[in-house]
Image (cartoon, rainbow, N blue to C red):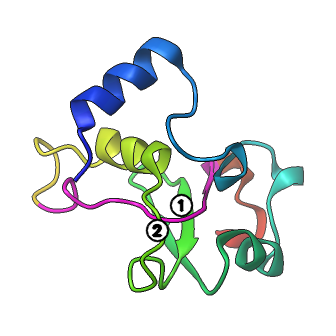
Amino acid sequence: MIGLSYQQERYNMEQTKANTEVSEFKIIDDEKNTPTLKEAQDFVGGMVECITWPNGDLLIVNEEGKLNNLPLNPEATLLWRMTFTKDKYVTGYDDFVVGPAIYIKKHALKNWA
């Protein structure tokens, strides 16, 4: 497990990437930048898994990322834990995101909806 309090504090203070390369975490907020299935598969390095968030946003990750021991994605994990808090959800908070990830805002979903 990562030290979430340290990661969150660092994220809030610096508003920068923590340990992943810039290319490993994308936030899409414009429909024209929404990837195709092929582009998403190329980015995550395999089959995609789509997780719909409570607000309608979508997280795309490698479906077999944990099985393939992909490295932790601290930015996506922090976003996950800030969304799926223990006071609102029984499960999910202690989960984590590995490998490259794409976060698509609800208004930019295009064909992924």
Q: Which mark is residue 13?
A: none
What x and y, as percent, mark residue 66? 39, 77
* Quadrant of the image occupied by residue 39: bottom right
Name the residue at 64% across, 69% down.
113
Q: Which mark is residue 59?
A: 1
What x and y, as percent, mark residue 92? 22, 61
Which of the two residues, 112 or 61, is positioned nearer the viewer here?
61
| Amino acid type at mark 2 | Ile
Secondary structure under the numbered disc 1 in the rendered image = strand
Pick whichever of labels 1 and 2 is earlier in the sequence: 2
Q: Main secondary structure of the magenta part?
A: loop
Which of the two residues, 51 or 107, is positioned nearer the viewer here?
51
**Image: 57 above or below 41:** above
| Amino acid type at mark 1 | Leu
Which residue is label 2 attached to? 51
Number of other residues with Cα within 10 Å of mark 2, as a class: few under 14, some 14 to 19, many 20 or more:
few
Secondary structure under the numbered disc 2 in the rendered image = strand
Q: Residue furthest right?
A: 32
What x and y, as percent, mark residue 100? 60, 62
Number of other residues with Cα within 10 Å of mark 1, as a class: few under 14, some 14 to 19, many 20 or more:
many
Residue range in magenta is: 91-106
Specify whether 33 is left or right of 55: right
**Labelled pair 1, 2 in contact (Cβ < 8 Å):** yes
Specify whether 1 is left or right of 21: left
